[in-house]
Image: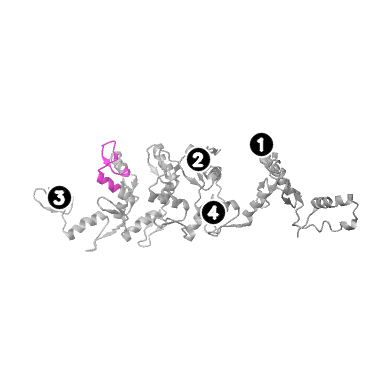
Amino acid sequence: DWTLRGKKRNRLIMSKIGPLIKGNISLNNLVGIGSNIQPDQNLYSCKIDSKNLSQKGHVNKMRTDKPKKPFSCVSCGKKFPTKSRLKIHIRTHTGEKPFSCENCGKSFGDRRYLGSHMRIHTGEKPFTCETCGKSFPWKHCLERHMKTHTGEKPFTCVTCGKGFIEKSNLKMHMITHTCEKPFTCVTCGKGFRDKGYLKIHMQVHTGEKPFSCEKCGKSFPRKQCLASHMNTHTGAKPYTCVSCGKGFRDKGHLKIHRMTHTGEKLYTCVSCGKGFRDKGHLKIHTMTHTGDRPFTCVSCGKGFRDESHLKIHTITHTGEKPYICVTCGKGFGQKDNLKVHMRNHTGEKPFSCVICGKSFTQKMHIVQHMIHHTDEMPFSCMTCGKGFTRKCDLAYHMRTHTGEKPFICVTCGKGFSRKGYLKIHMRIHTGEKPFSCETCGKSFPRKHYLKIHMRIHTGEKPFMCVTCGKGFIRQGLLKNHM
């Protein structure tokens, strides 16, 4: 029903009965004047375009001589169309927040913001995407989401041309070119490009982890970290690579993986020029130049560049081997080591040399193998000048000069320069002979011994005497013969 109330109704009635009263019209003729007003009656005329409007306020809105935003803020000069809007704006200067949430105590300067905030507690998501059905608590979130379907990125970086869905993302991206970090941690002095990143970083100092897994009890500082962790329980890998079909639990891991196809390496070391796909890997690499090792083992004092490396090292003290091979029962301290070990059973060798075709179970082995084709020896002994393809081999070699033997047998006290040598030596005490001949069944404590033994069955004699031509299965036998 169309009705007029309060002062507006009274003013309208008086505008009708005023002329009648002056003309001495009977009050009986005035009955029902207010109630007979119909909604299609246009009582007010606009002098500019001759339109007839039902309310005087509509005419006022069409006035061109009236300023659109007549109310100005005395603090910043910003203008507003209504006095109430100005009043709300002034609270941004005074800090006044009269509207508080009864659930969490958060305060707001505008009643509308409180109403919008309440959806966090109620879980209400009234805005739904017609394309994928996903719902959102706020309209601007839906509008932003729709751009993921349309591919629209209206905000473009003038420096590198990269596009963004939101203006705020572009603004934050621009700081990567200027290297500006305006938000600083008061505890450690570390700078951040975004206020949100600083807030997350503060949890490192406070130890706050407000998001807990209901299944295993593990806590996380961020909600998205918990969401990614939950996929480890469900086994879900919602992020799939369009190039190879590999699935990932986390969107960030997929982003890094894609660079293996494109060859893109966004992060470059300023010292040596080496490129990295992940910013964290660059950070760890930089420590090789600075010598910084911020993570220290409490048991032996050894320092590490990365916390994960310290965690792996700690297992060497505890002896913990939580990852067990289902085929042979061997235990491993790291999941990746178990994965590599399984290739011994399956025979899988995914890394092949493009020059000679030789295959390897680990990527590290093929990198070391490639050096043999180039004859490159990047690591040299400063004492004797001997070169090595690997840094660890140089470290082992240095012990021949220093006499250091850090790996001690607990049974007989004999020392060894390498952990592997100690492991082989322990088989003397345990009697373990894991390498068996498939022809005669004889067992050996070392793989090398089995290799020599097999020459008895094959008749191979690779060591030849240059004088008489006699062959031998071992170099030591040839030496004795000479």
- Disc 4 crowd, CA 10 A, few/some/many (<14, 14-19, 20+): some
Task: Report, in whole angstroms, how far the alpha carbon at label 3 lies from the one at label 4.
Answer: 78 Å
Residue for point 31% across, 59% down: 347
Between discs 1 and 3, the one toward the N terminus:
1
In the rendered image, residue 384 lying in the magenta stretch gets the answer yes
> Mark 3 belongs to which amino acid?
Leu
Q: Are marks 1 and 4 in contact (CB under 8 Å)?
A: no
Q: CA distance from mark 1 to mark 2?
A: 28 Å
Q: CA distance from mark 1 to mark 4?
A: 35 Å
Q: Which mark is residue 174?
A: 2
* Residue 247 image offset from top left, x and y in percent: 43, 57
Q: Which residue is mark 1?
A: 77
Where is residue 249? Give x, y as percent.
46, 55
Magenta segment range?
A: 368-392
In screen coordinates, is 212 left or right of 460? right
Front disc: 4 or 2: 4
Residues at marks 3 and 4 touching, judged by CB atoms closer than 8 Å: no
> Is residue 53 toward the left or the right of residue 255 in the image?
right
3D distance between C-alphas at marks 1 and 3? 98 Å
List x then y, in percent, for residue 457: 18, 61
Graded by Cα atoms within 10 Å as few (under 14), some (14 to 19) or many (20 or more), the crowding at tag 1 reads: few
- Give amino acid for label 1: Gly
State the residue in front, 427 or 20.
20
